[in-house]
Image (tube, grey):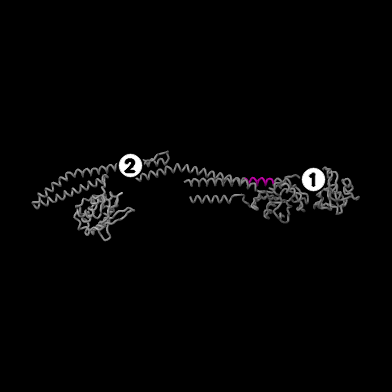
Amino acid sequence: MRRTAAALTAVSCALLTGCGIRPTGIISAGDKPFIGSRDTSVTVYLVSARERLVPVVRPGLPGHPHHAVTQLGVRPTSLERHRGLRNAVPARDLLVRVADDPSMLMVDVDGKLPWPRIARAQVVCTAQTIAGIRRVMLVGLPDSEGDNWVSHACDEFADLLE
Amino acid sequence: MVAGFCAVALLSSVLASGLAYVLVRRAILQRTQDAVLAEVRETVARTVPPELPPDAGHAVAADLERALTKQDGRTRAYAVALPLDREVPLPHEVGPQLHVPVGREFARRAARGMVFQRVVHDGRPYLLVGTHVTGYRTTVEEPQRTTPPIVFVSVSLQREEADLRSFTRAVAIADVMALAAAFVLALLATRSVLLPVRQLGTAARALGDGRLETRLRVRGRDELADLARTFNGTAEALERTVTELRAMEAASRRFVADVSHELRTPLTAMIAVTDVLAEEGGASPAGGTAARLVVAEVRRLGVLVENLIEISRFDSGAAALVPDDLVVAEAVTATLAARGWSGQVPVRGPDDLVARLDPRRFDVIIANLAGNALRHGAPPVRLDFRPASRRDRPGFELTITDRGPGIPDDMLALVFDRFVKAEAARTRSEGSGLGLSIARENARLHGGTLEAANAAEGGAVFTLWLPLDRR
C-alpha cells in the first residue's frame, strides 16, 4: 500500500512538473527559405560623363510601383560607376506620391539644395518609364519663374537624352 | 482491497491521461510550430525579390514586417538588414517589434538557416523564429547594398496554453470520475468476495465453539464455493464422529452405572452375611482372621461400588445439590469427629463463618481430603480455613496440609483422575482411587475449585475454595 502511494506521488509529481509549455533550446527548422518571387526590373536614368541621360536597368521591388524614382536617392552601383555614370540628384530621400490625377506623379524634394536641370531631367524621365505616368511635379522646387506647381514631361529634356 | 482497487484505477488513469496529455501537447505545439514556420517561409520567399535594388534593404524589411505582423498582436516581426561584417543589430528592448528578446546565438544561427525556439518570457510562452533567405543575387563588390534582411518572428503561445489547460481540466475530471467508478466497482467486487470469506470465518468460529451443526450456503461455482463445500463436508464428518463418540461414552457410563447398581444388591446381602460369619468364626483364631479379612474386603468392595455409583451420577448429570446454611467450623469438626480423626487434625479458622453448602457433599470432600492426608502423608496434618474472594465472589478457602513426602511432580496433574494412585508400588490400598475425583466433582458442583500442590517446606497441600453463596 505504501509503495503504491509512493508510486502515485512520483507519477503526479512528474505530471505536475511536466505541465504547461516548456521552453526549448534553439532548434533548426531546415534550410533558409528559397526566394520564390520572379525578377522584375525598373529603368533609372543616370548621367553619363558627357552630361547626357543614360537609362540603366535595376532590379524592381514588387509592391513598390514608384520604386524607380526612389532609387534616384541612392548612389550608383559599382558596375554603373565603372561605366562612368553618376547620379546628379542631390537629395537622399525622395517622397513619391500619386496626385488626384493618376497619370501625375508628385515628388517631394528638398528645395534648399541646388537642383541642376539634369537632376530634374533624371527624376522626370525615370518617372515617365513607370507605366501610366505622363507628367511629374517636383514639389518644393519652383521653376525659374518661381512657380511651385509646375509639372514636367520628359520631352522638355529631349536635348539631354542621348 | 477497496484501496488497492482504487490505487490501481488511479494509477492507470493518471498514467493514461499523462500519456494523452504529453501526446496532445506535442500535437498542439507541433501544429502551431509547423503553421508558423510554413507561413514565415512562404512570406519571406514571396516578399524578397531574387535581386535587390541597391540600398533597398530597409524597404524590403518594412515589407516583411508588415506582411508577418498580425493585427491581433499574436504575431510580431522584426526584420533588419543583415550586416556582413558585424553582429546582427537586435532590438534593444522587448516592445512593439518582438515579444521576447533575441539572443546573440539565436541571431547567429538564424543568419545560417531557419531556426526556432520556444521561450517563456514573463511567465508566458512564445515561439521565436528566425531566418534569412537564400537564392538571391548580389554583387561581388557591393554585397552589403543588395543583401536581403534577416527576419525574426515571435508568436504568442497563450492560446495553445489555454487549450492545454482546458484539456488538463477535462482529463482531471475524467480521472476523478474513473476513480469514483473504480470505488463503486471495488465495493461491489469485494462484497462478492469478502462476504463469503466473512461467512466462512463466522462459521469456523461457531464450529470451534462447539456448534457442530453449523453449515454454509454454497453459492456459485468458484473457488469460494468449493471452499464452502469442503467446510460443510468437514463439519459433517466432525459432527458425525463427535456424536458417535458421545454415544459410545454415554453407553460406557451407563454400563458402569448399571454394573454398580447390579453389584450393590448382592453386596449388601454379602456384608450382612459376612458380619454373621465373622462373629461365628471368631471361635477359632485362624477362622477369625480369615473371617475378618473377608469382612474387610467385602466392606471395601461396598465402598467402591458406592463411589462408582456416585461418580456415575456426576457423569450422567444426575447429581444435585441440597444446600443448607452451614457453620463451616462446626461442619468440619463434625466430619473429623465422625471419622475419629479429631485428635490427629487440628482445625484453625473463624468460628462464625457461615456458607450455603450441601452438608453431605461437604462432608464427603473434607473426609476424602483428610483421609487422604492421614493415609498417604505424614503427620502433623493441619486443616485451615479463612474467607477469601475469587473474581469478586465471596467465598472461603480451606487447606489441608501434611508433612509427608508430597506428590511427585509428574502426578500433580493427574492426582484427581480416577483410579490414580500416587504410590504406584502400593497397588493395594484401602482407598478406592475415586475419593479425590469425587471430592473435586463435589467442589465443582458447588461452583468451587479443588487444587493440589506441594508446600515449599515439603508435604502436599490441597486447597479447596467454595463460594459462600451458590448462585
Residue A101 lies, in percent from the top left, at 84, 43
Residue B136 appearing in the image:
yes
Q: Nearer the viewer, residue B407 or B9?
A: B407
Span shown in magenta: B28-39
Residue drawn at (70%, 55%) of the image: B93
In the image, residue B242 above or below residue B331: above
Badge 1 element: loop
Tell which of B321 and B295 is nearer to you: B321
As drawn, the label of residue B181 is: none
Report the predominant secondary structure element of the magenta stretch.
Answer: helix
Where is residue A38? Give x, y as percent: 75, 44
Q: Is residue A128 above or below residue B423?
A: above
Name the residue beneath numbered marker 1: A65
Q: Residues within 10 Å of mark 2 (few under 14, many from 20)?
A: some
**Gap in Å between the C-alphas at discs 1 and 2?**
114 Å
Q: Nearer the viewer, residue A133 or B374?
A: B374
- Crowd rating for badge 1 (residues with CA inside 10 Å; few <14, some 14–19, many 20+): few
Residue that protrudes farthest toward the right in the picture: A145
| Residue drawn at point x = 12 percent, y = 52 percent | B289
**Which amino acid lies under the numbered mark 1 shown in the image of this protein?**
Pro
Indicate whether residue B33 is drawn in magenta: yes
Image height check: is B373 above or below B219?
below
- Seen from the viewer's position, the closer of residues B381 and B247 is B381
Q: Amino acid at mark 2?
A: Glu
Chain letter of disc 1 in the image: A
Q: Give the side of residue B354 with respect to residue B21, left or right.
A: left
Nearest to viewer (mark 1 / mark 2): 2
Q: In this figure, which residue is indicated by the disc labeled 2?
A: B239
Residue furthest to the top: B220
Q: Is residue B392 left or right of residue A161?
A: left
- Residue A68 spot, x, y in % from top left: 81, 47
Q: Are marks 1 and 2 on the same chain?
A: no
